[in-house]
Image (cartoon, helix red, strand yellow):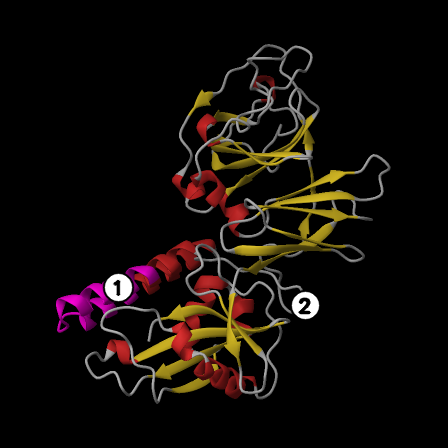
Amino acid sequence: MPDFRDQLGRELRHAGERRWSERTRAFSAGAVAAMAGAAVAIAIAVAVVLSLRPPSSTEQTGSPGPGENMVLQPAIPARGCSTARMLAATSTPRSLSSMLGVLRRPQREPDGLPVLNAPGGGAGDEGWLPAASIAFRGVRLVQQRPNIWIVPSRALATADDAGFSSPCPSSRVEPSHAGACLVTGIAGGPLSLGCFTTKDIEEGRAAMFVGSPDGNGGEGIVLAPDGVRDVEVIARDVHGAGGAVNNVALMPLRGARAGERVRVVFVPQARRVGRAPDGVPVWSSLGVRGRTCPGDALPLRRGDRAAIAAAALQVIAKLVPRGRPPIDTRGAVARGHSAGGGDGAPVQAMCGRLARERSVVVDARFPQVRFSAALSHAVYYVSREPRGWLVWGIGPG
């Protein structure tokens, strides 16, 4: 299935590039530049979020997607090696720095890898990290009390690899993943950690559980990509929510246990752009860097297609990006239709089956725009969330 999604994503991206290329041939230099920028943005958006299938905080049908029904992985206690072990220094993987904004800021004095003063290890021993190399200059202390570090690596071991709980050479770990470790504790120890691939982070699987001393619950720590505002962790009798600060969300999970199956929900950042004719708030995550999939989408109801089209038309002037020449939205018309048809294929490629089932494709036309056939219309993807309508994507039209 991943191979199919990868192939579909490449075909959609190439088709979009060809379509945009054909439409820009007859335009002026200024229009060509604007169109090229839009085309690249759409192609990059499809490529970056390809095969993501965000979960929903509401009841779902069908097979679970990433972030749903995942096992709550316990944080692994850091253990010193029998002899000091130095790790190779590498640069931060580009896949991580483009996904996690906190890694793009300069490294500061508190950042830096904490030392584990464990028997047989101590200063100079970095072997307590299950990795063959780490990006020392990429380490960030993203929160204090409790301390939480993000440690990027080009070659790390994850919980699926044998010997993860004892990452020293004797465990014969052969790390081969690009990703990052979440480390929590105090410098010198005790420290505990969990390591996740870039795909884990994208799909809401970079979550670890730090149990409380009394065994009744604990805290969930989730590593979230750019574009995520809030994170929810939901289990049968447990619910925790927290804001994503510096790409990390920390939340209490009373009653939760390690190994429990949970759902991790990403709620995207969005700005309020107005109200629909019926008074429902309209939000837009267009222009937000990173993940913009509708992580909290609700099932569509009868009449939602017409209501969503009316809502998009009400705020259309704020959805159209500013540029030269400007797009005149006066007299715009909009029509909403199900994403289950052919126009919904990009929705599924970008954000998965559930997003396709719970989104409406809105085709907007701008009759005042006569200088460009391509710029005279736009396609938007809209879902219903508890907070209102969310315009979360732009599609090829």
| Residue 335 sits in quarter | bottom left
Can you say whether 333 is above or below 391 in the image? below
Does residue 382 show up magenta in the picture? no
Q: Which mark is residue 357?
A: none
Horizontal and vertical percent position of residue 37: 27, 61
- Foreground residue among 238 and 12: 238
Q: Which mark is residue 58?
A: 2
| Residue 377 sits in quarter | bottom left
Disc 2 is placed on an element classified as loop
Q: For the C terminus, give its image quadrant.
A: bottom left
Can you say whether 71 is above or below 188 in the image? below
Q: Can residue 213 be seen by looking at this rendering?
A: yes
Disc 1 is placed on an element classified as helix
Q: Please name the residue shown 49% across and 41% down the image.
A: 102
Horizontal and vertical percent position of residue 221: 66, 43
Q: Which residues are magenta?
A: 15-41
| Left or right relative to 146: residue 38 | left
Horizontal and vertical percent position of residue 222: 62, 46
Q: Can residue 100 be seen by looking at this rendering?
A: no
- Foreground residue among 88 and 138: 138
Per the image, the residue denoted by label 1 is 17
Q: Do the residues bearing badges 2 and 1 touch, measured as CB atoms within 8 Å?
A: no
Q: CA distance from mark 2 to mark 1?
A: 36 Å
Can you say whether 173 is above or below 315 in the image? above
